[in-house]
Amino acid sequence: QVQLVESGGGLVQPGGSLRLSCAASGSIFRIDTMGWYRQAPGKERELVAAITSIGITNYADFVKGRFTISRDNAKKTVYLQMNNLKPEDTAVYYCNAGVVTSRLGIGDYWGKGALVTVSS
């Protein structure tokens, strides 16, 4: 079994910063692409940013220049540094990972989400 646990969400004022972390654990042989998605109330879940195992990144246009995704393969952890936050960034942020398990099964795993609220 594989678990993804997010941390670092909270309440921040417009223009502020937050850093999300997501740690993977369990029967993991290899982690491929890791990413962050978000879902605002009444909206569909959308990709925020993703990073491959060798560090190639992809960002949604609405976060380019403000958010930075990174990962520590040794710690099986992915990060999302969010700067210059806007009220429209308010959402539940979900961690996602493509995992090859120790039994060589392949799966797409999700965390339970971290709430980010941007408000004055």
Image (spheres, rainbow, N blue to C red):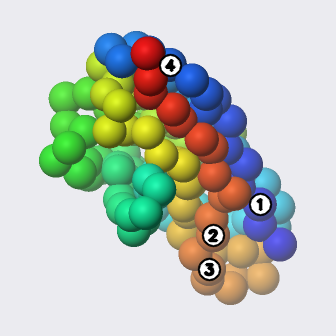
Q: Determine the secondary structure under disc 4.
A: strand
Looking at the picture, how far across and down is residue 1, in whole percent? 83, 72
Can residue 52 be seen at all in this image of the molecule?
no
| N-term mark: 4 or 1 | 1
Q: Determine the secondary structure under disc 2.
A: strand
In contact (CB < 8 Å): disc 2 and disc 4: no
Q: Is residue 24 left or right of residue 84?
A: right
For badge 1, the amino acid type reads Gln
Q: Which residue is mark 3?
A: 107
For badge 2, the amino acid type reads Tyr
Mark nearest the camera among 4 and 1 is 4
Mark 1 → mark 2, Cα distance in angstroms: 8 Å
Mark 3 → mark 1, Cα distance in angstroms: 12 Å
Residue at the image position 66 percent from the left and 58 percent from the top:
111
Residue at the image position 70 percent from the left and 67 percent from the top:
29
Looking at the picture, how far across and down is residue 19, in whole percent? 52, 26
Q: Determine the secondary structure under disc 1.
A: strand
Q: Which residue is mark 2?
A: 109
Mark 3 → mark 2, Cα distance in angstroms: 6 Å
Label at residue 3: 1
Residue at the image position 31 percent from the left and 28 percent from the top:
86
Mark nearest the camera among 2 and 4 is 4
In contact (CB < 8 Å): disc 1 and disc 2: yes
Q: Which residue is mark 4?
A: 12
Mark nearest the camera among 3 and 2 is 2
For badge 3, the amino acid type reads Gly
Residue 108, placed above or below residue 8: below
